[in-house]
Structure formats: C-alpha cells, structure tokens
Image (tube, rainbow, N blue to C red):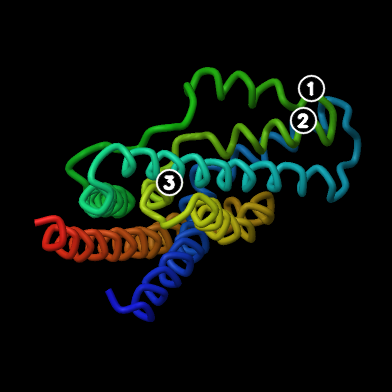
Amino acid sequence: MDHSLHHAVEGFGYFAAFMTGILGSGHCLGMCGSLVCGYFIRARAAGSGRLNVAPYLAYHGARITVYGAVGLIAAALGAVLVSTGQIGLAQGMLQIVAGLIVILLGLELLGLSPLKLTVGFAPARWLRQQFAGAAQKGALRGAGIAGLVNGLMPCSMTMAMAVKATTVPSVAEGGLLLLAFGAGTLPSMLLASFLFGKLGPRLRGAMQKGAGLFVIALGMSTLWQGANYFLVMHKLVG
C-alpha cells in the first residue's frame, strides 16, 4: 500500500472514532444519560453536598481512561494473535475478521444486524453492584469508581472501537484510537444532566444512525486494508 495512502487510512480511523463518539451522543444519552444523572442525584443524597466540577471531571476522566486502557489491551491482544502465525498473513486475516465484526456492530446500531454482538468487558451484575454503591464512597472517589464502571458497561460503539484497535500497527495507537472515541463522547456525557430528556427520541435515533454509519465506514476501511495486506503478503509468501 502507498505510504501516504496508509497514513490517510490511519487518519480516517481516528476521525471516524471521534465522530462515532460525537454522533453517538443520542445513543450515549439513551443508554447512559440516566445513569450519569442518577449517580449524581444519589451522590447528593448520600451527603456529598453541593457537588463542584471536580467529581464530574473524575467521573468522565475515569470513564475515558477505561476506554484508553481497553484500546491498549485490544491492540496488545491483536499483536499477540499476529505473532502466533505467519505474521503478514495473520495480520491481514485479523484485519478482515475485525472489519467484518465492526461492520456487524455498525449494523446493530442501525437496527439491521442479524446477530446480537454487544457484550461487556465485565459481568453485568457485578458492574451494577459497583455502580449502585459508588455514591457511598465519597465525592471524588465515588465519582471515579462510577466512571470506571460506566466505561466497562456493554456498548456496541465501544466494542466496535475495541475490535478495530486489535488491528492497529502499535499498542499506543490502540489506546489513542479509543481515546479519540472517548473524546467524542465527552460533550454529551458532560452535559447529560441537562440534555437528557431534551433530545427527543427521533433526534437521538437519527444521531445513532449517523454513528452506525461511521462505524460501518470504519469497518469497511479495516476490511479493505486487511484484504490488500493479505493479498500482498500471500504473493510474497507464495
């Protein structure tokens, strides 16, 4: 693949991840907006008093840190998978498979997927227990725990970004990809207490469809990269 084209495709990956987070605001508000509002309502009731900006930063900082860690782990896992076989062919196949999974996750966001692929990074029951008790841990510590738990909750968009991260050239780039996605979710999640209920279901649905289209585009670019890489390496190995 041409070097400049390779960089253009990589750049598109970061842009697509960020835009998935931005356009996924409707999805985030629908899935997690009530969680954020509920947590801070419970935190006030638990005696944390009038909350300043610090707990909000702790909550979302912890949430985005989880995304970055997931990206690092996914990229490291991808590197391990590639190193177990013929490196070039394995990398191409990994990108093809990851691209197909990301496309299916995008279709799921559009409500068109024939399969249910959304899974979490930890047991749902344990996550609910930790989240429910976080408000009792103090303003900053509790917000940080709640944010960590929120970052681990099942989400099609997060899973799509994690799968994509398994195909990036380096572990650091996996973390950056998920951080770009997390940065895209930040505006809506910071304002969740205000925006939740202000965006109607029609607008949230339209934004979720936009996020789904970006996820599908990201999957297609990954699939295209993998197919090209596989064909090149197949000729070299053959």
User: Is residue 25 visible in the rendered structure shown here?
Assistant: no
Specify the farthest residue to the left.
238
Report the amino acid beneath label 3: Ala
x, y percent for residue 175: 54, 51
Gap between marks 1 and 2 measured at Cα = 7 Å
Residue drawn 42% across the image and 57% down it = 169
Report the amino acid beneath label 2: Gly
**Label 2 Cα crowd, 10 Å radius (few <14 / some 14-19 / many 20+):** many
Q: Is residue 113 left or right of residue 142?
A: left
The vertical placement of 139 against 157, above or below, is above
Figure quadrant of the N terminus: bottom left
Gap between marks 1 and 3 measured at Cα = 31 Å
Report the amino acid beneath label 1: Gln
Please tell me the numbered disc located at residue 162: 3
Select label 1 or label 2 by which is in front: 2
**Label 3 Cα crowd, 10 Å radius (few <14 / some 14-19 / many 20+):** many
Residue drawn 33% across the image and 42% down it = 83
* Labelled pair 1, 2 in contact (Cβ < 8 Å): yes
x, y percent for residue 106: 31, 54
Q: Which residue is mark 1?
A: 136
x, y percent for residue 49: 91, 35
Q: Secondary structure at mark 3?
A: helix
Q: Is residue 221 left or right of residue 184?
A: left
Select label 1 or label 3 by which is in front: 3
Residue drawn 57% across the image and 42% down it = 69
Q: Which residue is mark 2?
A: 142
Residue drawn 29% across the image and 58% down it = 219
The foreground one among 183 and 40 is 183
Q: Secondary structure at mark 2?
A: helix
x, y percent for residue 129: 60, 18
Q: Earlier in the sequence, mark 1 or mark 3?
A: 1
